[in-house]
Image (cartoon, rainbow, N blue to C red):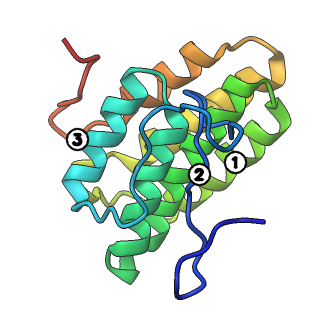
Amino acid sequence: MRDRDEAGRPRNSRPRDEYGRPLPRGAIGVPRVPDDYSPGARQAIEEARRLLAVERPFHAHEVLEARWKSGPAEERELWQGLAQICVGLTHVQRGNLSGAAALLLRGSARLGGYGSRRPYGLDLRALALAADGVITEIDSGGIDASTAIAVILDHLQDAEGVRSGPPD
């Protein structure tokens, strides 16, 4: 049974490995995004970039999910779409290619609804097309997790081309 807080909301107390897979209770996992994390928009984007740069898309998804849950309702599709793309990348890492394609497609569709708008300087059209390209490569059997993550990371940048690389 999943842990819940006093209000009955689910909590993420179980440790996870670097790919976001649950570990047995009491095991030592990698640091997690706290349940009460409430990042600003730019903070969420930068942290997601940083996590993708070290090939941790599950954890990037948690950051983006925290933003969708704490951010303005009118931005819900943006943050859900970005989070779904990261979950798709998580599935690529785990070898679940059909799940990866499904989540990448859902995320791409959510971002596609933004048309040419560029919230926070993000070129969502290019990012959606990059996710679609990863799906095409999955379908042809020609992409590995590192490449898929790099493709998305390359497009998760602002209009000026600013992006985060791996930490020093």
Asked whether the viewer can see residue 75, the reply is no
Image position of 127 with respect to 13: above or below: above
Would residue 137 be found to the left or right of residue 163 on screen?
right
Picture quarter containing residue 19?
top right
Instruction: Identify residue for label 2.
Output: 84
Residue beneath the point at 67% across and 24% down: 93
Instruction: Identify residue for label 1.
Output: 103
Q: Nearer the viewer, mark 3 or mark 1?
A: 1
Instruction: Identify residue for label 3.
Output: 158
Residue 147 pos. (x, y %): 55, 14
Disc 2 is placed on an element classified as: helix
Depth check: give the residue in front, 106 or 34: 34
CA–CA distance in space, label 2 to label 3: 19 Å
How many residues crowd mark 3 within 10 Å: few (<14), some (14–19), many (20+)? some
User: Which quadrant does the C terminus fall into?
Assistant: top left
Depth check: give the residue in front, 87 or 102: 87
The amino acid at mark 1 is Leu
How many residues crowd mark 2 within 10 Å: few (<14), some (14–19), many (20+)? many
Depth check: give the residue in front, 132 or 70: 70
Give the mark nearer the N terminus: 1 vs 2.
2
Residue beneath the point at 59% across and 51% down: 84
The amino acid at mark 3 is Asp
Residue 162 numbered mark, or none: none
CA–CA distance in space, label 1 to label 2: 5 Å
Disc 3 is placed on an element classified as: loop
